[in-house]
Image (tube, coloured by chain):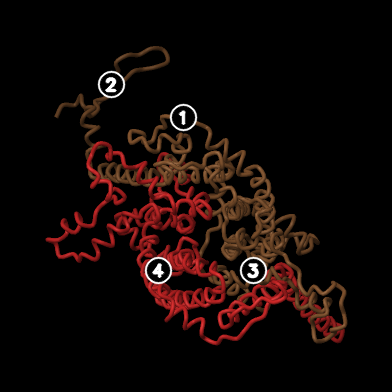
Amino acid sequence: MNNTQSTPRVRKETKNTIKVDFDRTPFWERMKAKFLNKYFLTKVIWAIFRYVILIGISYIILFPFFTKIASSFMGPEDFVDATVKLIPKNFTFDTYKYIFLENKYMQAVGNTALLSISAALIQTFVCAMIGYGLAKFKFKGNKLMFVLVIFTMIIPHQTLQLSLFMKFRYFDVLGIMKLLGGGSRLLPQLNITGGATSINLTNTYWPLALLSATGLAFKNGLYIFMMRQFYRGVPNELEESAYIDGSGIFKTFMKIILPLSVPMMITIFLFAFSWQWTDTFYTSLFFTRTSIVLMKNVIAIPESLNMTYAGTTMYNAAIRNTCGLMIIFPLVIIYLFCQRYLIQGIERSGMTAD
Amino acid sequence: MNKEAEVKLVTSNTKKRRKSHSLEKKQARGGYLFTLPFIIGFIVIYLPVIFESFLYSVTTIERINAGESYQLVWAGISNYQKALFSDPNYSQILTAGLRQLLLDVPAILIFSLFIAVLLNQKMVGRAAFRAIFFVPVILSTGLIAQIDLSNTSLMTYMSDTDGIGTNAAKSTSVAEIVSAMDIEYLFGSMKIGGGLAKYVTNIVNQIYNIVNRSGVQMLIFLAGLQSISPAIYESCNVEGASAWETFWKITFPMISPMILVNFIYTIIDAFTSSTNSVMSYINQVYGEAGNDTLSVAMAWIYFAIVIVFVLLAAAFMSAFVFYQRRD
């Protein structure tokens, strides 16, 4: 063993710096030790495996959108041409143009936006309220009410579709209209409403507004559950200090709790808004007339594009997909801005099943 | 002096009791105030609707006064009998739908847990992958799912890249990513059942469907994974546990409440989605004139079977669920 290996040699000395040569392990040796061990190799293999799977599944998710976008720009000739696959040969905007002009697209966007935004706002607020009430207050029937919330989530509205329709077709709260209209046995001579014993609420926004305001609309059980889990994680000290400062229950909720739960509420608003936007069940149940143009009425073949030739089935499918693309276009924009909150809100909820 | 102290004690006692009483009352009042919308909705809308729905399933509807009002005619269990015994398709579709449900639920659960674990790890582009994976939750529901149903021909046409110039026989099987025949041939010599191979190939072939339906479950699993304390993993690492052991000994028990939640959610979601074969059949029956109460009876039968299944499975699974004791 020579001594020079352990002692550093001073190679160059200036006023402020010195350069010292250490005897280091050679470069290749170091690299070998760093990269050619079991730990690093398993890490690399795992990373490759992970990226292959993630990219593969991302491809599966996004590919239908690519084909839809590609086919939306194709002219009718492209669907009988076997050489055209993903890249259109007769590039055209006609499909978009005619859907926009002939399917009352703007009208549908306006109506659906009004419907979805109001329904989603009401649902977000009401579910936050109910979730807060269930999470933070002890009262008789708290547990029972939570079970009932889950219960409304479990029973599919399809089971109730006929009775929901009937409820709002012949709407009447606790027999009041029946009483006023003279239909009841109690006061048959009373006839204020001119013989009408119920109100027809179909083809209006009322059924959805009422369902939203009472936390019974589509998947509201899930939202209430999410809000409840979120509020259970909020420390009680926060409200207690507000109460001590003389703030009432409702004021505390509005001024302290609601601003705190904005990320979670954005998540719920996003869910409620987009599920209402693409909804078929409630819109076809409550809007039987076509005078109110909603998104479901946009999906149709425009007059100018209606033709019969060898590729009709495929061409019509492409047109319907273009309608779908135009329907989700506003959602895509909102999603791009809000997806950050979607994941954040869920992560902060710290949902546990107890 | 002594008397005074006693009086003081008494007053403080009553004061204390009164105060705690009012706090309790305040609590209860707040609770009722905040849940009031739900209470009203449940009593005024939901309960009558459920009751009427059940009533419809045992009656038939006759409209009078030119549709202005209606009359219910008692029909007993004839709707149920008709659904189960006279309707040629219902019982077949029902059994097929339930079988499909049983097969899909484990696939969706395993897939969403697996992806949630992957998306929870630190890596380059995690935010982008998360954004892509939650696209179906927002964009592939309702109307879009309905359009997608009639899309198969277009999708095959577009993805069929090797169809040009080859014989037509090939394009018939192009929708399948892997064919069950190959896999069975591969596993034939090993003693693995053909049923399992068929199940796996079936899942791989409908991967798009499964990805689409596991978005919310992924979110719930991800939230659960985030709530596991990193200190536990650290100590595991120090003790020399491998990733495999850590998953089964730590992640899996800690996530087991989420598995139960997701299990129930998946069943309910599968069973309420309008793309479900039983539901679409019920919808079709609902659309036929004069059959509206029959469809309600069908929906109730389906609901009863699924709820019994959910309760049994949940009771069975909750025996294995591990709850971490907080504080």
Q: Are marks 3 and 4 in contact (CB under 8 Å)?
A: no
Q: Residue at x 43, y 73 (%)?
A: B90
Q: Are marks 1 and 2 on the same chain?
A: yes
- Chain B drawn colour: red
Amino acid at circle 2: Asp
Distance, label 1 to label 2, CA atoms, is 67 Å
Residue labelled with disc 3 = A165
Residue labelled with disc 4 = B97
Residue A233 seen in this snapshot = no
Considering depth in this image, is B45 or B106 the residue closer to the camera? Answer: B45
- Classify mark 2: residues with Cα within 10 Å, few (<14), some (14-19) or many (20+): few
- The numbered mark, 3 or 2, whose residue comes first in the sequence reads 2
Q: Residue at x 65, y 51 (%)?
A: A262
Residue labelled with disc 2 = A21
- Classify mark 3: residues with Cα within 10 Å, few (<14), some (14-19) or many (20+): some
Q: Are marks 4 and 1 in contact (CB under 8 Å)?
A: no
- Classify mark 1: residues with Cα within 10 Å, few (<14), some (14-19) or many (20+): some
Amino acid at circle 3: Phe
